[in-house]
Image: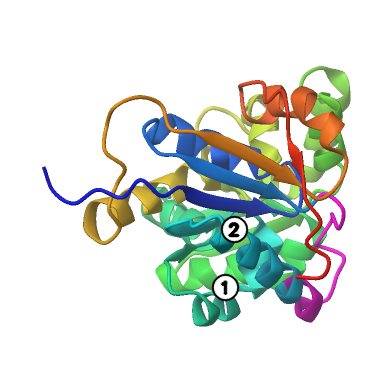
Amino acid sequence: MGLTDPRPIGVFDSGVGGLTVLRALRARFPDESMVYLGDTARVPYGTKSAEVVTRYSLRNAAFLTAQDVKLLVVACNTASSVALPALRAALDIPVVGVIEPGARAAARVSPGGKVGVVGTPGTIASGAYQRALAAERASLRIQVQACPLFVPLAEEGWVEGDVPRLVARAYLAPMRQAGIDTLVLGCTHYPLLRGVLAEELGAEVILVDSAEATADEVEVLLSRGVAARAPGGPGELRVFVTDTPDRIPELSLRFLGERVERAEHVDIEAG
């Protein structure tokens, strides 16, 4: 057996949406221990400046590195769009965002080069997915759409039925008109609405979940440069939030697919 590393994988998001990324990681790497930080006191990041988001991201990273994590997953599209250079410069562990893996996956699987991206207003306005997609495959025709109502629908559990269907129909109308063949779910909340999105776009449109694409990237790291934890039982999970820990049991069941009975409250304001 080669070298092993029992240290956990660190994951942070501005709130609870990143639990969908954690879900993909837990499914792919059940032996790995993981530490999740949701900065719920400062959510959303999408309305804040790049400087502020970078500062918050560095604080989140400092907290997680204090937990002795061996790699960091930035499970937040806004932070991934602006803070990765600062995080990679500040840390001596690998840092993986969610935008580059999602863009790589979409560029690879799109049969006709017509890719749509749905995300929060902040992520769409940043142009991060557009740049990442163009860097992967310059010939792509890219259609983007901000979908601000998808986040509250996901958090309230309104992920099927007439209400989310009508909202999705309105948001996706330009995508259908443009004839996209691939859609990137550019927000960690959006996988909860996957069924509605697939129904509105039709079975011929490929949906790319950035959470799954990010797990692919972590798998590469664990096979090449970062030692995996030795097999021998499920890895430990610890969940920290900066506010409203009482909502985590309910929300974790929805976003993570498993119930986290207790989230630990932490104050990183002075970090």
Q: Is residue 12 left or right of residue 44?
A: left
Q: Which residue is mark 1?
A: 84
Q: Measured along the vertical axis of the image, is residue 84 above or below residue 181?
A: below
Amino acid carrying mark 1 in the image: Leu
> Could you say where residue 218 lies in the image, as x and y percent from the top left?
39, 51
Q: Which mark is residue 64?
A: 2
Q: Residues within 10 Å of mark 1 (few under 14, many from 20)?
A: some
**Residue at horizontal 31 percent and vertical 42 percent from the top:** 229
> Could you say where residue 210 lies in the image, as x and y percent from the top left?
54, 48
Q: Is residue 94 visible?
A: yes
**Residue at horizontal 26 percent and vertical 62 percent from the top:** 225
The stretch of residues the image draws in magenta is 40-53
**Residue at horizontal 78 percent and vertical 62 percent from the top:** 268
Q: Nearer the viewer, residue 142 or 18?
A: 18
> Could you say where residue 146 lies in the image, as x and y percent from the top left?
78, 55
Displayed quadrant of residue 194: top right
- Looking at the rendered image, the disc whose residue lies closer to the viewer, 1 or 2, is 2
Find numbered disc 2 in the image and state the secondary structure of the residue it sits on: helix
Find numbered disc 1 in the image and state the secondary structure of the residue it sits on: helix
Q: Nearer the viewer, residue 238 or 155?
A: 238
Residue 81 on the magenta segment: no
> Could you say where residue 159 lies in the image, as x and y percent from the top left?
77, 24
Q: Is residue 213 left or right of residue 202?
A: left
- Closer to the chain start, of discs 1 and 2, is 2
Q: Residue furthest top?
A: 161
Colouring rule applied to residues: rainbow
